[in-house]
Amino acid sequence: MLEGGCLCGRVRYQVDSLDDDVSHCHCSMCRKAHGAAFGTYAAVKPGGFRWLQGETLVKEYASTPQVTRTFGGHCGTTLQFIVEGETRKIDVALGTLDGDPGIRPRYHIFTDSKAPWFEITDNLPQYKTRP
């Protein structure tokens, strides 16, 4: 099991395990949500996410009709990327985990939207959308 939380420590969560489907997302929404060149997310296996504390402090923002982003209501830390559909898919912002999750990013997505001041220098595959 892995634990993580927000910057101020008021919100804490636990995940049973993560898929190895980890990506760096360069879309403009992820860049703005993270205040960085990209956001890095990992998918939580179904049913494997739970709040440990501060759930009432978590705020939600529907960035598209299918996507909800959660963040710490006090400090603003991006926590989750939730896709609604036939099944609900939860990704966690990898930088909010306390320790090493033991998995590494596999690819870059939405690279056509990447910040013009950022250059991708690794050898990971790059996609214009989500593969």
Image (cartoon, rainbow, N blue to C red):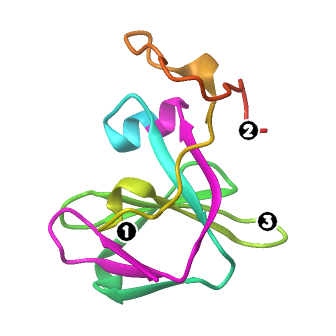
Q: The residue tagged with tag 2: helix, strand or loop?
A: loop
Q: Earlier in the sequence, mark 1 or mark 2?
A: 1
The stretch of residues the image draws in magenta is: 1-30
Residue 18 locus on image (x, y percent): 58, 69
Residue underneath mark 2 = 130
Name the amino acid, label 2: Arg
Q: Are marks 3 and 1 in contact (CB under 8 Å)?
A: no
Residue 67 among those drawn in magenta: no
Residue found 53% across the figure and 30% down from its top: 26
Q: Secondary structure at mark 3?
A: loop
Residue flagged by tag 3: what amino acid is it? Gly
Crowdedness of circle 3 by 10 Å Cα count: few (<14), some, many (20+)?
few
Question: In this figure, which residue is indicated by the disc labeled 3?
Answer: 85
Name the image quarter holding the C terminus.
top right
Q: Identify the residue at horizontal 44%, vertical 10% (top origin).
A: 116
Image location of residue 76, percent across then percent down: 26, 57
The residue tagged 1 is 59
Question: Which numbered disc, 3 or 1, marks the residue that appears first in the sequence?
Answer: 1
